[in-house]
Amino acid sequence: MTRSLTLSAAAAFVLLALGALVLPDWAMFLFAMALAKGLVCLGIVGMMRGGLVSFGQGLYYCLGAYTATLVANTFGVSDIFLLTVLSTGVCLAVGLAFGPLLASYRGIFFAMLSLALSMVLYGSLSKMSFIGGTDGLNIAAPTFLGWAPEGRALQTALYLYVAVMVVIAGTLMRIYFDSEQGLIALAARDNELRVEYLGASVRNVNTYSYVFGAVLGGIGGTIAVLALGHVDPEFAFWTTSGEFVFVAILAGYLSVPSVFVAAIILEMVRSFSNLYFPNTWQLALGIFLLIVIVVLPDGLGSLVRRRKGDAT
Amino acid sequence: MDLVATILVDGLIYAGWLFIVSVGLTLVFGVLNILNIAHGSLYAIGAYASATLVGIYFANGGDAIPWGSYAALILAAVLVALVVGPILERGLLRFFYGRDEVLNVLVTYAVFLILEDVMKLIWGVNPYFVYEPYTLLGDVEIGPLFYVGYDFAVIAAAIIVGLGVWLTLNRTRMGKVVLAVIHDSEMSQTMGVNVPRIYLGAFMAGTFLAALGGALTAPMISVTPGLGVNVIIVAFAVVIIGGLGSVPGAAIGALMVGISRAASVHLLPEAELFIIYFVMAVVLMFRPEGLFAKTQARKI
Amino acid sequence: MTATVLDVRDVQKTFGAVTAAQDISVAVPEGAVYSLIGTNGAGKTTFVNMVTGYIKPDAGTINFGGRDIAGMAPRQITRMGIHRSFQIAQLCNELTVEENMLVAGAIHGNHRPSFLRNGHNAEARDRALATLERFNIAEHRNRLIPELSGGVKKLLDIAMAMAGKTSIMMLDEPTSGVAADEKFPIMDLVIGALRSEGVTVIFVEHDMDIVTRYSERVLAFYDGRIIADDTPDEVLSDADVRRYVTGAAA
Amino acid sequence: MTTKTKIGGAFAALTLAAGLATPAAAQDDTFKIGVITFLSGQAAESFGVPALNGGKVLIDMLNQGGQLPAPYTQKGFGGMTIEVVEVDEAGGATKQVQEFRNLVQREEVDAVVGYVSSGNCLAIAPVADELKAFTILYDCGTPRVFETGSFDYVFRTAAHATMDNVSLARYLKARDFPVESFAGLNQDYAWGQDSWADFKGSMAQIYPDAEEKTALFPKFGAGQYGTEISALLRERASLVHSSNWGGDLQGFLLQATARGLHERSQLVLAAGDHVIPQLQDKMPDGIFLGARGVNGLAAKARGGELAELTDTLWNAYEAEYEAFPVQAPFRMWQALLGLKTAVEKAMAENGGKKPNDEELAAAMEGLAWDAPSGRIEMALAGGHQAIQPNAIGTTKWNEAEGRMELVDVEYFAARCVNPPEGTTSQEWLAAGFPGAQCD
């Protein structure tokens, strides 16, 4: 890990942590949710670097959230670290099972198959009335290694937890993006035939980024459900996944921090448009989306980082 | 034995509807290479437009010739194609040709969000009803069951649409040009085909078919906000099963989904929700690009 | 007498009604330089594609390294040592020249590609630079692919294919899309580099001057069959070849 | 590093924007309520918009003062003007939790009244308690809100959905309707699944010999019911139960009646009244239906002591929106009138100040008040869950006046069709309605 990356990670954490001091309550919650969703989107960005876009990341977001909730409600586990590890483990296993299957598909077929998978989870959960069906389940507030904060302290602790996760995941993903494997993924996005004829398996490349996406989705889902206190099958619905894709496109695949900035922007736009245009918020959101796609075709990241050999 | 017949009839009726709503989607994808999420919104707009038009028809003495309401239904779809099609294609989509497929999905997702609210601004949230055309064709008794004649009219409409699209593509000069564009738009452009005009035409045709689906459905439902959302996913599945860009594929896909769904409702209602994904997964497992995918042999 | 490195026997391939390969049999000795000639559609590229795994033959065997590689995936065949270049250079357009080379280096390096080690690490960059220098294209290292001339693209394509340990190199029209005055310098460079490492070379070519100058042996294709397999002089004076391939007056 | 600095700058700017966007807190002479209901999507037409419209009519009258009969003569809430912040309920529970926090922490509303969707109610309740924000759930049906949790600041002013199906079964018995078998078609989500389970449970008690036939759950918003109707026609059950609502119910009724399903089987609809204004004579005669309370036509037909209150609001609504009020406005009215009663009770106790969340919650607990839908009593879940009377009737088209009427209406006392305190609705059904007080 280079010094500049360490410094960037430290700076990012300090900046995020400052948010805990200055943000009003509602905004701290909004930021925590946005960062949790940003983790899911970071997984999509990882796949985008290899040329794939999953329209079904809701699968892992939902799976992580349900695993945490069921474990918490069945076994009385409330420790956020343990819950994160457990649900991430489940997502990892599922990701490993589906990854190799989906990795043979490209473009729109990959997008639609991943979407179908998450819709199957959505349908299955909707049918399971013993775990709440479409109404979903509640989960109690988490504890932090035995400490059970309440009110503002709880929100702050959750916010800092997600901030730490964001910095760790962001740093690891940056290392991966810059690694030899990351370079091969970029090449696969660009020219799959070339990569195959160099002797690397594009399918493996795609499987790796899919599995990383699954893990990130699980972490994001776990934190989101702990912050929200409630999960329902909607977590796996296609519109949820569509939003993740939107954030990923808004951010672009060049810069990691821009993923989280994009996630926060989307949450703010949605929150304010919902309040100020309660009858036309979808219209406002759609126009915002179009403007972003037209003005920033390579995403926010392209403002700060150009895809050239000298980008460090 | 009559159970099998019932399943087939129910399946055919559903398949007819599925085909009409998905054939436009596959056509637009084939030509423009855009998987149009807003297809569902166009369906809903078609439903609203026909509800409005048929309403106007009966409010102005249409009762004398109730059959005219069918013309009003179709006219509504034509109007939607003439108005909304060019606005979307010329005003927006043409700026995205050749861009990443998935990015284009997102563009149409934005259009979908916008149209949802635009419809609400135009038609409000109260439902529209135009049940007159639904009951006009009387009942059909098949075995122990009654069907509405209109259901069979939908099947007939699906067949006419299918034949119409197929004949246009394969038996007219224009259609052959469109097929050439589906096959390789760059090549066609160098060969002097007016590709922008083909794109506009194809998108308007796709819009017409989506709106026609909505217009034909309107008499049997209440036309309310949120109508388009559910159509998108099933139409996607049918098109993916059949192979993106393939008209016969959409027909076969619609039949497969329609009949398996009917079988499921009669025999195993719990599985109905999953049946469409099941069919899709099975097809893609054996044919990763769908049943009738356009071949993508690449010269190296 | 050197050992046979590639032994193709009775290979058949049809695409619908078109016969792309019919009873193709050829044995290539180690270290030889072969060229493939024939009109478009005669079956040259199909031959290259079958040997490198892009197309699976309908019948027949392709023996290499003690195994029948017919129908194996390109990736596996590449790992066994048969590398190839392409008629249209297959490069990563969004990456720089150096990064293209780094990708090749990362895949062909001494260790499996790492998730941690930076793709731009100093050692890899040195190696990439060395290869680029060898092919005289180091000056372009920071440019993106679409900015390059046809000749540079071809050289980079071949340089990437050579990054790993190569036993057989198949060059599909190495000089197509290259300016006339660049053709010979490029071929000198490429064939020189390959020969110095003892690599067996099979190249597809339309330019008979290049065929006679660089290859030891020529396979002439017509209608999916090999109609001549001999030294360049013999093949080019063959009546059938003159009639069907080179088009020179009989 | 410049990358980081720029992104950092963007982040800082967002943080600042979030910090600055703090609106003015409500003043002491206004009472600010956040009203959350469906303004888009399917439920907008059936529930959200009629409820909001009903709420507007009532709030306008309250803010003018003196428009309603006693005890609702005082202006606004205890003299304070009522101010409304509307939020669309569409978009899922995640979004609603976020919007709820924004309403409470950013908009600083004094009370929240909202939620049609049971999923949203379940998600909001713990958050309301965490934020100590007084919240009224005005519409959602699931009994699970208070059966699986207890909340200090959350109140539901409408009876939960168990009542709807118990009443249907009791109605069949009261009318001596013979039931050999029954089938169902319900929407495939918690509402439809729970409703079918409740109906089945009630039938098992009241018609133990009736055979249960196919239970179909078409997707929410399916639109096409052809295949399902074929299956139901083949079943020839005595009854077909449906708790569908909105477009799903309208579509089902149009398609089912065209194929004569209502002639082969008796249709019973748990919540069917709200489609009458749209369907008019397309709604066939002789259908048994409820309105999730003595709402809409059943309230109008009841008359009695509450007739003045009911008619005042009914006429105002009809004048404003050219349609008669169905169940949704009635539930909004009972919520707002309950809130008014609680605010004024709390002010009587704290010396006339604007009550805070604790004082409101204390005042609301166990409260009882009159609404157009009857007497509402916060009798369950330690005074947090309302019970209310219910009514089931039979449709009959009045050709002469061109309007739908409800005939053969049976009214059920609140304690006849709701479980007593301390019993969950599932236990109560399974045990055969112990403690039910029917006259």
Image (cartoon, rainbow, N blue to C red):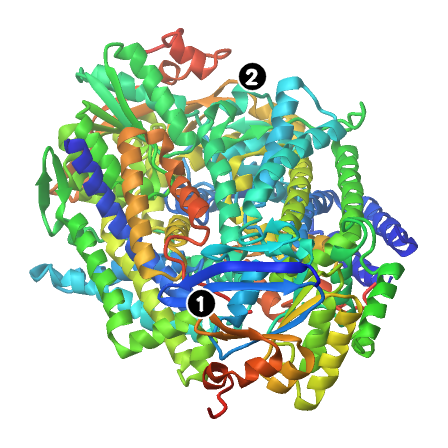
Side of D179 relative to B118 (left or right): left
Callout 2: 10 Å neighbours few (<14), some, many (20+)?
A: some
Q: Is residue B37 above or below residue B173?
A: above
Q: Chain of mark 2?
A: D
- Asked if marks 2 and 1 touch (Cβ < 8 Å), the reply is no
Between label 2 and label 1, give the one nearer the viewer.
1
Q: Is residue B72 above or below residue A35?
A: below
Q: Please tell me the numbered disc located at residue D382.
A: 2
Q: Please tell me the numbered disc located at residue C108.
A: none
Q: Quadrant of residue D273?
A: top left
Q: Please tell me the numbered disc located at residue C20.
A: 1
Residue furthest toward the right?
Answer: A3
- What is the three-letter code of the residue carrying label 2? Gly
The picture places residue B202, in percent across and down from the top left corner, at 36, 71
Q: Nearer the viewer, residue B156 or A281?
A: B156
- What is the three-letter code of the residue carrying label 1? Ala
Marks 2/1: CA–CA distance? 84 Å
Q: Nearer the viewer, residue C71 or A19?
A: C71
